[in-house]
C-alpha cells in the first residue's frame, strides 16, 4: 500500500540498496516494527517493509515526487516492490 509522507513510522533496520534498486528509483528500504504512533496497536502481526521510491513526476519546485510504499512482502527485492506498485 502507499502511505502518506506524514505517516508515523519507525524504521528498525535499514537495508542496503543494490544498484538495481537505485536504478529503479528506490532511495530507501527498511523494516518497520509498527506503522503509526506508539499509542496505537501494531497494524500487523508480521514484519512490514517500507520502500521509498522517486517518480518521474515533479513538485512545483522541480524536485522529484517520492512515494512511500509499505508491504508485508519482505522477501521481494526493493526494486520489485517499486515495479509492482507502478
Image: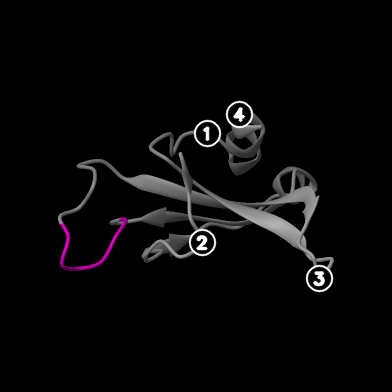
Which residue is denoted by mark 1 in the rendering? 76
Quarter of the image containing the C terminus?
top right
Circle 1: element type: loop
Q: Name the foreground residue: 50 vs 37.
A: 37
Residue 85 colored in magenta in the image = no
Magenta-drawn segment: 35-40
Circle 2: element type: loop
Name the disc covering residue 5, or none: 2
At 58% across and 36% down in the image, what residue appears? 81
Q: Residue furthest front?
A: 60
Name the disc covering residue 84, or none: 4
Q: CA distance from mark 3 to mark 1?
A: 33 Å
Determine the image quadrant of residue 20. Answer: top right
Q: Pointer 2: residues within 10 angstroms few (<14), some, or many (20+)?
A: few
Rendered location of residue 53, percent (x, y): 65, 51
Residue 36 colored in magenta in the image = yes
Amino acid at each position: 500500500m502507499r502511505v502518506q509522507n506524514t505517516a508515523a513510522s519507525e524504521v528498525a533496520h535499514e537495508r542496503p540498496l543494490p544498484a538495481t534498486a537505485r536504478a529503479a528509483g528506490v532511495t530507501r528500504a527498511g523494516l518497520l516494527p509498527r506503522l503509526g504512533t506508539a499509542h496505537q496497536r501494531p497494524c500487523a502481526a508480521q514484519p512490514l517493509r517500507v520502500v521509498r521510491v522517486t517518480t518521474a513526476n515533479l513538485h512545483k519546485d522541480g524536485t522529484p515526487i517520492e512515494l512511500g510504499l509499505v508491504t508485508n512482502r519482505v522477501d521481494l527485492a526493493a526494486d520489485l516492490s517499486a515495479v509492482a506498485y507502478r
